[in-house]
Amino acid sequence: METVNQSNYLGKEKLSKLLVKFAIPCILSLIISCLYNIVDQIFVGNMVGTAGNAATGIIFPITVVGWGASLFFGDGAAAFLSMALGKGETKKIPASVGNAVLMSFVSGIIIIAVAYIGGDGLLTVLGAKDAETLQLASDYGKIIYAMIPLALVQNCLASIIRADGSPKVAMAAMFTGAIINIIGDPIFISFMGISGAAVATILGQFVSFIMCASYLFRSKNFKVNAKSFVPQGKLLGSIMALGTSSFLTQVSIVVITIVNNILLVEYGAMSPYGTVIPLSAFVVIMKLFQIILNIAIGIAAGAQPIVGYNFGAKLNSRVRELLKLILKYTAIVCIVATVFIEAFPSLFIKMFGSDSELYMEFATSCLRIYLSLILFTCLQKVSAIFLQSIGKAHLAAPLSLLRDVLLIIASLIVPIKFGVTGIFWAAPIADVIAFVITLFVMLHVYKSLKTEDGKPDESGEAQAIKESVPGLIITIAREHGSAGKQIGKLVAEKLGIPFYYKEMTALAAQESGLDKEFISDINVNAPAALHSLYLSTEVVQQAVVAQDKVIRKIADQGSCVIVGRAADYVLRDYSNVVNIFIYAPEDYRIRKVMEVYGDSEEEAKKNIRRSDEARGAYYKNISGMTWGDRHNYKLLIDSSIGAEVSADAICRYVQNGV
């Protein structure tokens, strides 16, 4: 079984192409997730009335708390996974996923307990002051609460699935759930009133959960087992630090919603609009606000695996370019949205129902005010997500809160003079101040990425080696579970030369026209007894020839480290080639495979045997010689002494022994 890390295409592929691939499914996933609430608002507003919209707005803060908890652990685990892949440190990924899923579920149980125990008293605190709104909110909430634990797990897994390189899977899960909700809303509402909207929502959420949970059995870069779900305090601390920005963003939304609900009721009662119109209008405006914000967040969150990988791999020029692309696309989306909202506000308000001219007058005016500087809002939020992606939680967390804290302060002050509409004017005021502060922070971060170019230090020993052995080529063959790839990457970093592993299969695919995954697996695609026959087939030989050609092209470019693919034999006629074989005791390799892949001891033994047999058969077919024969290598290393020590030993040998 080959290493399950993503291939280096995140560090090689054109950035605009990568961003489109990852961001579009992420945007669609987030937009679709909004549909759960938005579709409810549309059908409830048209089938139940303005009071129904106000009631769902009362439940909104509770669901957002759950959303925040799932992102706390899900986005944290996603960032952890991406950076781990970039660094080539995959050991803790399964446990990070398991711990994130567990804590999301536990958070859901806590929210259920608080919501049910709090009952109508909690809903009253959230803004349900009149009897009709309170009853509708209670009917809707009691059903919504039941699905919160599984909904949180689903949302947590969606972030992880995107980071694992499968954004379309996350999107498909969200899309399926949304379709079920859209179809179910008019049917169930017609029979059950506002409770029917809640039933349609939880049915969609449950199907989305099943689809995301099933991904754990076919993930690309990790494999979870029962041990992955055992809480690990230190690991959870790392995950939570990376997810703090996402969590605080959601918590701030809750605080803003609660504060605004209370203020809208208070100041609305002193205005011609009463209490229900401002509350209902605010709910609708926040839904439209969320759609635009989620598109921007989708761009930044979709880029998170790419940013995290390249930052982990110290490819800072690509990280800087990604930041510029994220900000550029965010600005385009927000400018277009602002033009449409300012030009056609009534069109958007009417989608959610309209009970009176007075309501339309208030809602359209406040929509224009609240979203007038949505551009600044989104640029500020995506900057915080970017900082989270590169592990700068100490900057991401306060920036996530900045705009919202300012908004709360402004919401408390501005209405004193301007009344109920002043609550909406607080948004653009907060946006301007938050944007200016964020701009200064991001300029500083950008400059630091520019000075920290991420190139390995080529002074001292590494420079001496490159000068004494120009065109140095190191090939590494290794037993499965001996950490050979990790050691090879460390050697390349220490010497400041390129490292090649999965990249060779991608290049060979371009050379031959064959599928990249097929070429990657040519030495494991057949049972051991049939390896010779399989490797002799025409299509496999075509792949082998293409791969050998690529290996020689790589070697012709200069110094490098090449892992696997019988490179020692392919480059047998080259000078300055150091062929190394890495092995380890069986018990050490079994432990390594169990740690990295989450295999049981029996599975680890089986996979080690199968993988080594496949490598041996491939090498025999290519060279006619025996794989692992000490006569074919210049240096043999027992890696049980440790990956770092092994890499240092190789570097010393290259300097002194060539």
Image (spheres, rainbow, N blue to C red):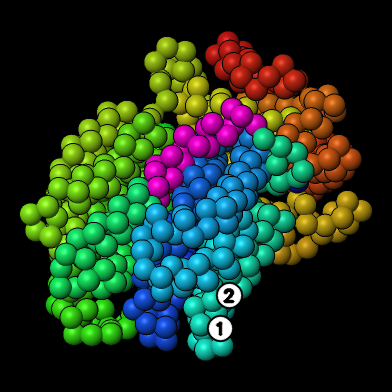
What secondary structure is marked by label 2? helix
| Quadrant location of the C terminus in the rendered image | top right
The residue located at (69%, 30%) in the rendering is 483
- Which label number is shown at residue 192? 1
What stretch of residues is rendered in magenta?
Answer: 232-251
Quarter of image, res 142: bottom right
What secondary structure is marked by label 1? helix
Q: Position of residue 430 (x, y in %)?
A: 18, 49
The residue located at (31%, 42%) in the rendering is 401
Tell me the amino acid under the disc marked 2. Answer: Val
State whether residue 410 is above or below residue 478.
below
Q: Position of residue 132 (x, y in %)?
A: 41, 74
Front-most of 268 and 316? 268
Front-most of 401 and 56? 56
Residue furthest out toward the front = 131
Disc 1: CA contacts within 10 A as few (<14), some (14-19) or many (>=20): few
Quarter of image, res 538: bottom right
State whether residue 360 is above or below residue 119.
below
Q: Position of residue 45 (x, y in %)?
A: 37, 81
State whether residue 130 is above or below residue 152.
below
The residue located at (57%, 56%) in the rendering is 116
Find disc 2 in the rendering and name its residue.
199
